[in-house]
Amino acid sequence: MRPSPRHLPTALVAFLLALLLAVPAAAAEREPLLWRVHTDAGSVHILGSMHMLRDEDHPLDERVLALFDAADTVVFEIDPAEAMSPALGQKMVALGMLQGKENLSDILGAEGKAALAEYGRKSGTPTAMFERMQPWLVSLMVTLGEAQKAGYKPELGIDPFLMRRAREAGQATAGLETAESQFAVLASPDQEVQVG
């Protein structure tokens, strides 16, 4: 059964958390999320990515590194120049801020306000900092914060790690889409759907 649009943010957070919990098991087995597509014209390898990993999830599988090093061009979700730019976080925050005089408290129902307040109490996070943010950005920040508390680090994620490796080796790289297009997708549902 597909989640309704109203429950999309909840389903997305649940999916992301499930992926985070699945990483240790996959890492323990050391089986990379790696696929090969082959035609007469050649082969393409597709590597599943995790944006955050723990220290113990490294080193990456040697098969992945060997294929990566042998690749003519490496295509990432987002072009490495954009992904590694300090302006990326600024773009995300700019797109994730509420417009006008509306505050997060105006959008969240009683249940949402209570849940956010409880999160603030348990985590020691001052939830007042979320007041001018759209619900999707708050959800993303809470999820990333909790992942970091569990030992996951953005700089150890597969993409950042391989982007640095490609830059050091002078490898050709490209991106499938822009970060701004991804942020726009997150921000596109109306606030009722985001709060869902």
Image: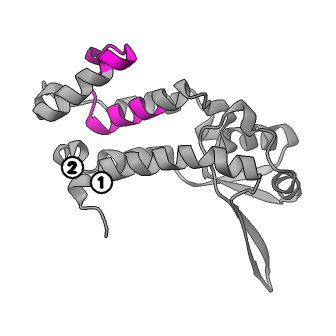
Q: Quadrant of residue 195?
A: top left
- Magenta segment, principal secondary structure? helix
Amino acid type, residue under disc 1 in the picture = Leu
Task: Report the magenta residues as a range.
Answer: 120-144
* Residue found 38% across the figure and 50% down from its top: 12
- Circle 2 sits on which residue? 193
Residue shown at 67%/53% (left/top)? 174
Q: Residue 98, percent across and down? A: 23, 30
Q: Is residue 40 left or right of residue 110?
A: right
Q: Is residue 134 part of the magenta span, yes or no?
A: yes
Report the amino acid beneath label 2: Val
Mark 2 vs 1: CB contact within 8 A:
yes
Please name the residue shown 54% across and 43% down the image.
20
Query: Does the image show residue 27?
Result: yes
Q: Report whether residue 131 is seen.
A: no
Above-or-below relation of 12 to 120: below
Q: Which numbered dot is residue 8?
A: 1
Up the image or down, 6 lies above or below 106; here it is below
Structural distance between the alpha carbons of marks 2 and 1 = 7 Å
- Give the SS element for disc 1: helix
